[in-house]
Image (tube, grey):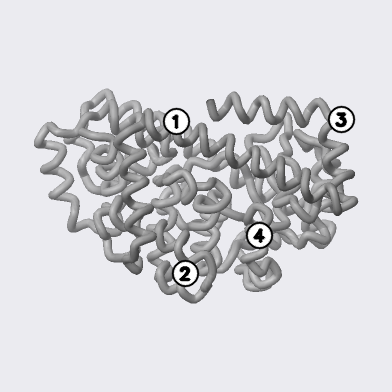
Amino acid sequence: MTGSDTLFFVAKCLTLGCCPERIEAVREIIRSGSVEWEKVVWTSTSEFVFPALYLQLQRAGLLDELPADLVEYMEDVTSLNREHNRQIIAQAHEITAILNKEGLFPIFLKGTAHLLDGLYQDIAERMVGDIDFLVDEKVMERAAELLIATGYRPLLVYNPKDRAVTKHYPRMVHDHRTAAVEIHRQLLVYPSSKVIDINDFILNNRKLDQPGSMFVLCDQHQIIHNILNVQVNDHAYYYGSLYLRQSYDLLLLSQRDNPLKVVKDFGKYFHLMNGNLAINSIAQDHPGYITCEPDWQSRLFIRRVKRNINHPRWERFSFSIGYFGIWISNYVRVLVRSTYDKDTRSSLFVRLINPKWYAYHFRRFHEEF
């Protein structure tokens, strides 16, 4: 199996719950002996969909077709992830209680939001790292202070003068809690944050049927955030990348609303979002729930993604060049802005004299390379 064969096989298995008519076709692929399970494990693990893959195969009655030791391993990992997510949910409720006491109401985002919102049949399906939630920018610092008072600590020093170009408060951790926390004032990195009317996203939230006052974005806004978070924040459009965790979440969200209609109604960054719909539709073997408008930009994006999947060395090389290009352009932008903006100069000075800022960058480079 080539890299794209493996990736697309995993993606197709993830559609079995929405497309049960595919079960026998997947069974035949497995019985043909063409599936290289080591590649499947590596791909699904690196894409953070390993438990979801196991649960889809289990519900489809296909586990008997897999090697017994692999099934046992998948069961163990899924059980561990289920317990991890129970702790994530409990931590989200605790955070909500802390904030509610002071009249603040978190709007949970991404994986945590989907767990709380019942997007998954089994909470073990989603692998979640951080707990992300959105608040009005006027109360972001207050929300952070409340969490700090209960034992959380930021990994970087926060400069209030940095707020205008900051997506979220510095990542916070707690010695006795499972997940790190990010308190957002925006959903996209600066300056792309300008394309989203954050007040509209905050006002059109949906209260969860959970204890306390906790919220998620409405379904349409969850779809927009799902796509733009990878295409813009993770630079997937720039790198030519496909992320199966995002793809799986989008498939489930598409059961609630039509992604292409949502993207058209949004009316911004259409080529980025349409490209994501195009590659997800292909990876999932055109399930019908995710469609796109074919154009030269989407076709070019598809070719770039497929090239990167099938040529990992080229992908690594192009990623390295692109990664440093993004960092350098960000540094140049900050330096130029500092020449005419007092707050940016102050923020830059605070960063340059803070050893933790350098440690953070070295850690990021180490994680990526």
Say whether residue 235 is left or right of residue 181. left
The answer to whether any part of residue 58 appears in the image is: no
Q: Is residue 24 above or below residue 221?
A: above
Tell which of 291 and 67 is nearer to you.
Answer: 291
Earlier residue among tags 3 and 4: 4
- Residue 282: give x, y in percent of width and height: 28, 54
Q: x, y (%) of residue 38? A: 28, 26
Measuring 70% from the left and 60% from the top, which residue is drawn there?
A: 212
Query: How much space separates mark 1 and mark 3, taking CA atoms?
Result: 32 Å
Q: Earlier in the sequence, mark 1 or mark 4?
A: 4
Residue sitting at x 54%, y 69%: 268
Amino acid tagged 3? Ile
- Disc 1 to disc 4, C-alpha distance: 29 Å
Reading the image, the residue beneath label 2 is 263
What separation in Å lies between label 2 and label 3 (alpha carbons)? 43 Å
Mark 2 or mark 3: which is in front? 3
Which residue in the structure is indicated by mark 4? 193
Q: Are marks 2 and 3 in contact (CB under 8 Å)?
A: no
Q: CA distance from mark 1 to mark 2?
A: 32 Å
Q: Amino acid at mark 4?
A: Ser
| Image quarter (top left, top right, bottom left or bottom right) of the N terminus | top left
Nearer-the-camera pick, 242 or 21: 242
Query: 171 left or right of 115?
Result: right
What secondary structure is marked by label 1?
helix
Badge 4: how crowded within 10 Å, few (<14), some, or many (20+)? some
Is 174 placed left or right of 342 in the picture? left
The answer to whether residue 344 of the structure is visible from this angle is yes
User: Which disc, if any, is residue 353?
Assistant: 3
- Indicate the quadrant where residue 72 lies: top left
